[in-house]
Image (cartoon, rainbow, N blue to C red):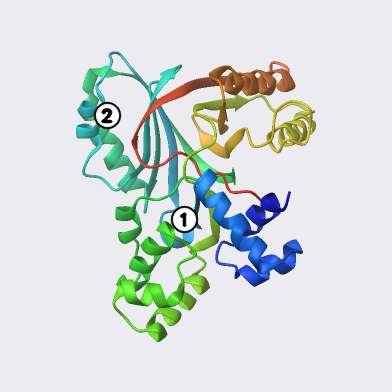
């Protein structure tokens, strides 16, 4: 139980000092240190940054599904998608769509140029291309690629610091200064400016290697009925493990979208059927008032699986 409480504190603020965590959890400093070490070794605990993309300069974010007429090799797809900072995550899938993208852009024109380039490269092999604009990330997030962070409209030192904190959010100031080749004063000043900008939503902790081997992503379109709010509350309880429907932490991501879909969810399980059971529960709760498209991820071509930070 203490390990879970310590993990929660790290997820809410991974730069929190050990003594501060110990006081909140109600145990000794040595206990916190040993539990953190255990979590790192056994569960691949990893410290990173959850960004406020709008304040970082990437307000246009999209989740995209695509169906293809033929099978592509990972090498063929990697060649098509290389050379752009727009896509942050790309995965091959098996189900009602064949590819899943998460893309960010500084403006809509930048995104549309990338989309045009990809769809032109795939030519007649695309059956459907469905793009949904990300309105709000309710749970989980995709990490940004280093090249994208470095393309942000920020001073060079701040961007380089963000790259390092994204890889290890608990890195102390003196190590940051040494790695960045500047003084401790410069690092502290740049850090304060970053925090003031609000580009960092929080320093958090996630599992480097997800605990579940099978992952299913699904888009859904909702029929907004009079009881929609009541149904949404039931879904929330299901997602947070507050009800009897699913085990805790099966949802890695919940996103409100607009465009091709009203929402996007990512679920995982020890077995593939566990993840699909969540989708069945979702459909049952909405009693036919939802249309869904789902697919299991088979290979990640770019980026990282969704990071699930506890709240």
- Residue placed at 71% from the left, 22% from the top? 286
- Residue placed at 29% from the left, 54% from the top? 147
Along the polypeptide, which appears first: circle 1 or circle 2? 1
Answer with the quarter of the image where residue 264 lies.
Answer: top right
For disc 1, the neighbor class at 10 Å (few under 14, some 14 to 19, many from 20) is many
Q: Looking at this view, is 128 or 297 the one in front? A: 297
Q: Looking at this view, is 152 or 132 the one in front? A: 152
Disc 1/disc 2 C-alpha distance (Å): 25 Å
With 181 as the anchor, is 59 left or right in this view? right
Expressed as whole percent of the image width and height from the top left, the position of residue 137 reads 56, 45
For disc 2, the neighbor class at 10 Å (few under 14, some 14 to 19, many from 20) is some
Q: Which residue is mark 1?
A: 53
- Residue placed at 74% from the left, 22% from the top? 285
Expressed as whole percent of the image width and height from the top left, the position of residue 300 reads 36, 33
Expressed as whole percent of the image width and height from the top left, the position of residue 265 reads 56, 32
Expressed as whole percent of the image width and height from the top left, the position of residue 162 reads 40, 64
Q: Which residue is mark 2?
A: 119
Residue 73 against residue 151 in the figure, above or below = above
């Amino acid at each position: 139980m203490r390990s879970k409480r310590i993990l929660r504190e790290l997820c809410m603020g991974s730069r929190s000092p050990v003594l501060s965590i110990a006081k909140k959890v109600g145990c000794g400093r040595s206990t916190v240190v040993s539990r953190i070490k255990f979590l790192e070794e056994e569960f691949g605990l990893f410290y990173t940054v959850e960004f406020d993309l709008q304040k970082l300069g990437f307000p246009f974010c999209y989740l995209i599904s695509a169906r293809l007429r033929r099978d592509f090799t990972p090498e063929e797809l990697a060649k098509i998608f290389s050379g752009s900072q727009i896509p942050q995550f790309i995965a091959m899938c098996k189900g009602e769509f064949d590819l899943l993208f998460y893309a960010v852009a500084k403006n809509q024109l930048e995104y549309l140029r990338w989309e045009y380039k990809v769809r032109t490269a795939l030519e007649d092999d695309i059956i459907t291309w469905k793009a949904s604009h990300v309105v709000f990330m309710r749970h989980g997030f995709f990490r940004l690629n280093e090249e994208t962070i470095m393309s942000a409209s920020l001073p060079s030192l701040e961007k380089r610091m963000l790259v390092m904190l994204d890889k290890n959010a608990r890195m102390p100031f003196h190590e940051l200064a040494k790695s960045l080749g500047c003084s401790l004063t410069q690092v502290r000043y740049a850090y304060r400016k970053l925090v003031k900008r609000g580009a960092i939503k929080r320093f958090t902790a996630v599992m480097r290697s997800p605990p579940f081997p099978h992952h299913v992503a699904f888009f859904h379109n909702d029929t907004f009925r009079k009881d929609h709010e009541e149904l949404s509350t039931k879904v929330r309880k299901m997602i947070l493990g507050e009800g009897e429907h699913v085990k805790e932490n099966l949802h890695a991501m919940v996103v409100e979208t607009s465009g091709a879909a009203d929402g996007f969810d990512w679920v995982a399980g020890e077995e593939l059927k566990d993840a699909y059971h969540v989708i069945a529960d979702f459909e049952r709760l909405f009693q036919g008032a939802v249309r869904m498209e789902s697919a299991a991820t088979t290979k990640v071509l770019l980026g990282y699986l969704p990071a699930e930070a506890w709240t």
